[in-house]
Amino acid sequence: MKKENPEDNKIRRKPAGQSSKSSNRRPSSNNSDLMLPSERSKSNGSSDRRKSKTSSSNSRRSSTSSNPQTKTRAVSPGSKSGTRNRNSNKNSANANDNNKKNISKSNNSKTLKRKMRSRRKKKIIGGVIAFFIIASALVLGFVFASLKDVKPVNEALLDKLTHQTTTIKYSNGETMSTAPSQYKKTPIPLSDMSPYLRKAIISIEDERFYSHSGVDYWGLGRSVVKTLVGKKQGGSTIPMQVSKILLTSSDQTMSRKIKDIYYALEMSKSVNKDKILETYLNNYFVGKSLSGAEASAMGYFNKHSKDLTLAEAAMLAGVTRNPSKYAPYSSARITGDESKSDLDHKLLFFLPTEGLEGANSTEKSMYEKLYEWDLVDQDTYKQLKSGDLLVRKAINNPDAKTRQEVVLSKMKELGVITEKQYVAAINEKINIQFPDSNEKIANSVESLIEYDVIDALMEQGKTEEEARNMYYNGGLIVNSTIDPKIQKSIEAEYAINSNFPNDTVAANGLSEPQSASVVIDYKTGNIKGLIGGRNIKARKTLNRAITPYQPGSTIKPLSVYTPAIDTQKVTQSTLMSDTRGGYRFKENRADNPETTTNGYGSMSLRHALALSSNTIAYKTGELLGPTYDDAIDVMMDYLRNFGITSILDFKEEKKAGMQRSDRHFNSLVLGGLTKGISPLQMAAAFGTLANNGVYIEPEVFTTITTYNGELIIKNTPKTHKVVDPDVAYVVTDMLTAVIKEGIGNNAALSSGIPVAGKTGSSNNYLDTWFVGYTPYYVGATYIGDDAGVKNEDGTIMQRRRIEGGAAMTSSRLWAKIMNRIHQNLEYKTFTKPDNVYMTTINAIDGGRASYGVLAAFINGTAPDRYSYAAIQTPKKKTPSTRQPAPGGGQTTPRTPQNPQPSPQQPGTTPGQQPGTTPNQP
């Protein structure tokens, strides 16, 4: 008996026809490539039994093929039939195995594909569901976030917002005024509005107004569809527009749209439709700084809203689509052949900076007629003549007519008007008519705030029209820099007519001479007080505080002495000849300016500035560059750094087609500028010296907020360094000599608080100045006679000289204002920087002296030489009464050889009283 193979006990073939559990399994060796990674992992992680069966199957195949005795049928060795049978059985078995493998492979492939498709479908459906869940959550979150700060809407709130205007506040929070506007929003009841206007607005803006619940979903959907195909169409209802005007903003954001929809729905629940329509018609913007039915009717047609014709009402309704494009009028040049009636109530005025071309000869020739016809007042006439204003006439706007026809067609389509009414309105001629203004004239502070706020809003991306409407009618809170105490101090002195020499009142009611003053906190750049004219009753107010005038000698510290000290070409003790002539540059030899100090001979720069010497200023300016043009460039650069923007540079002006230029010593040294410099810019420039050489651009407001306190703009002044603190202090020390030792002694303060400043006057004393500063504030005061005053007989008077010059007029008025402002302020002096050395010099020759004045020098630049004059105690100084030569400020009687007592003890700082302790740096 043959021994049993141990392997045969482990692997036994099942009888034919018996099913095998492993027969339906996919062979590991053939189907592993079809398995997904997850299926392979599942297969590898099966039980040991499955592994054993797979292993047994493989072993059985191996055993069967290698041991013929394990076959169920015995075949004799060497038999051909047996061999064929074995081969046939073997081939048949192989074929069967291959067929089974192919069938199994096909079935498995189909099953796998079905599973993969099923899984893919489930993943897609799951992803879509997840997307919508996440998107819905995000949308809901965004909606809730957008509505987190909404407020209840009711009729009382709408009334409150309708009647509010922009409020201007003082720096201490007190209310100064409401924003000035020629045509303020004038709320009226719905019953006082033209029925044509009501129907026109509903027809073109919201035809289902009385039937929807605040949101017209049909109109909104149509708007979305048209927007998608590239056709812009608004979907906002009247309640949504009320929300946009009064409750939200004009920002093009989804958050704002969501709020508008919410407010429209809530509004329609709590407020009746007529009240909503009334609110809209009292607030909607119609262009040209006009808002509301009444203001637009008066502003465009000089009539009340209830009196509007159908044609006029349709035109005002059409403006809402695009106020800039569809306003009823546009502007055109005056042609010169107009009659008074052609221009009466049709004149428009613009600033040249608005991109308009300057006036041509025809327009200029009409200025006299406009004045004679009383179509412009004194101030407006002056600005037209000087080129500070341009005039245009109003003409009917063809775009507005086209839009009006669209509105009328819509009204006819809806059955609101008849065919007969439609034809009559289309053919009606529209007559533009501006109203007479009975508004309170805005003062200079308010007009400056208006200008700066509108400019700031435009910098945020708003158009000028949008910015103006927001300022006039947006209910803003403007927090100004104006100190009420300082402002009232200025106004109090301007109410005293005796402060102005030869005070007269012209036939047109304008006081002469005119004047302007500005006070700035130079440490912050905040304008603390400002006045731009006296006894102004004109409709178009000229703000002289921001209008350029000839600065005269007040320009010298900025253009000549600061650059010379900064570049160390000179010190304040440098000795120069005051005699006429001896100039380096041929251009100056041709000018040959006269002496303004009666030819003292040689004197120090300190004394030359105190007496306002023209000749020494010229000669000092020549040290700034090797050539005439080089010196001019240096002076212009310093003036620009001091914030002076009205200088005309020939190189730049020539490119612009202008022939005017300030590239002359006469302009830059003596102040004979083409345009001049405004008091505001002069004050800011001198404030730079007071502020350790750092320029701060003056500002008139700090913040702008909405009516509910939301911050819109925070004003941050621009600053830059002009000179080092030691240079600024040395120039300040020289400017104190103007008051203590020179022609500006009328500017001294009664409290003894030190003053540094400079007088100035133009030719024939038509313009007089004093610009000065204390350790607290800087101020500029200008007095001058306006050009073109009309007599009772209609003739134009010439400008008159200011009697007494700068020393007797502007400096005295400056001191009176500053005495009020500095009342009860603590005494203090200017702070000396570390890099400044103080030594006593003779003020006239600048040499070292045992007694004299304590003068400041940058370390290492103090004089080595001693004074050539014997020190004598002068007689007590009396206020100056003599007048300077034109352009040179005010002269004094000839000063003794050594006029200076010791107003300060050695070791004190400029402006320090003996026995006090100076401020430390």
Image (cartoon, rainbow, N blue to C red):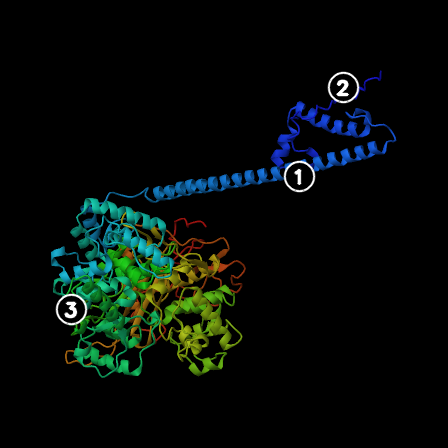
The residue carrying pointer 3 sits among few (fewer than 14), some (14 to 19) or many (20 or more) residues within 10 Å by Cα, namely some
Mark linked to residue 357: none
- Does label 1 or label 2 sit earlier along the sequence? 2
Residue 102 shows which numbered tag?
1
What distance separates the C-alpha of mark 1 from that of mark 2?
Answer: 31 Å
Q: Which residue is mark 2?
A: 9
Give the camera-side residue of 711 and 195: 195
Residue 886 position in % (x across, y down):
34, 76
Are dots 1 and 2 in contact, CB under 8 Å? no
Residue drawn where x is 31% and y is 56% of the image: 222
Residue 366 placement: quadrant: bottom left
Q: Is residue 864 above or below residue 66?
A: below
- Label 3 is placed on what type of residue? Glu
What secondary structure is marked by label 1? helix
Name which residue type carries label 1. Answer: Asn
> Three-letter amino acid code at disc 2?
Asn
Residue at the disc numbered 3: 419
